[in-house]
Amino acid sequence: QKEVEQNSGPLSVPEGAIASLNCTYSDRGSQSFFWYRQYSGKSPELIMFIYSNGDKEDGRFTAQLNKASQYVSLLIRDSQPSDSATYLCARDTPLVFGKGTRLSVIA
Amino acid sequence: EPEVTQTPSHQVTQMGQEVILRCVPISNHLYFYWYRQILGQKVEFLVSFYNNEISEKSEIFDDQFSVERPDGSNFTLKIRSTKLEDSAMYFCASSEAMGYSYEQYFGPGTRLTVT
């Protein structure tokens, strides 16, 4: 099975803290990885994608990819209550999603 | 900003009935997708569509499912004989092209309830 695994959470962080979300994948041939945010009852919306080993930063978000360890992460700096949502990790196209990690940012 | 639209937002149907879920992708996009999400479960790929034919499909997309682009704007998913386990949120998505640098834009979804 070419799975994407995530801890379902919930992950609770105080407002202003760094939230760290993790994802592992089983298919070594996977090329690209995506982080989506999904609010309850809504559709996924893309935060960012990464395909090279290392870090990629976009505003308060940093994606990290380690292909040797088959590990992807998303860091959210200065977390806000509005960041409270489920964060979905996905690989490749068509997208193969993990179950998502529920993040709760406490004001 | 252009967006993917889906109708209806909620569809209730009886087991064994046929349903058609409709999507209007973003106008200059060439690749179209259907995903589904059973309540509390992961988002699952069903099918991708390009140049008026299916380019890839998952194991979920069996003979009871079909897709069509009946005109220049709509993209539909038909479920021929619905089962209770087809109850889910169905998302349509579109992208300009295939590949990791082309974002898939998701529609708001159609919640299908099979009774």
Image (cartoon, coloured by chain):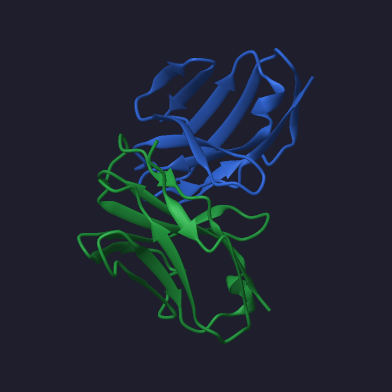
Q: Is residue B61 above or below residue B6?
A: below
Q: Residue A84, relative to residue B14: is it above or below?
A: above
Position above or below: A66 against A99:
above
Asked if residue A8 shows in the view, the reply is yes
- Left or right of A98? Residue B67 is left
- Furthest-left residue in this view: B51
Specify whether A60 is left or right of A33.
right
Residue at the image position 41 percent from the left and 44 percent from the top: B3
Residue A9 shown left or right of residue B74 in the figure? right
**Above or below — where is B83 with respect to B75?**
below
Quadrant including the C terminus of chain A: top right
State the green chain. B
Q: Residue at x 40, y 35 (%)?
A: B1
Residue A29 lies, in percent from the top left, at 34, 43
Q: Quadrant of residue A75?
A: top right
As drawn, the residue found furthest toward the bottom would be B16
Instruction: Pick the residue in front: A36 or B2.
Output: B2
The residue furthest right is A107
Image spot of residue A26 (x, y percent): 47, 45
Considering depth in this image, is A1 or A15 the residue closer to the camera? A15
Question: Chain A: what color?
Answer: blue
Q: Nearer the viewer, residue B115 or A12?
A: B115
Q: Could one spot residue A1 in this view of the protein?
A: no
- At horizontal 51% and vertical 37% (from top left) the residue drawn is A36
Give the image quarter of residue A100.
top right
Q: Position of residue B12 (x, y in %)?
A: 63, 73
Total residue callouts = 0
* Quarter occupied by residue B41: bottom right
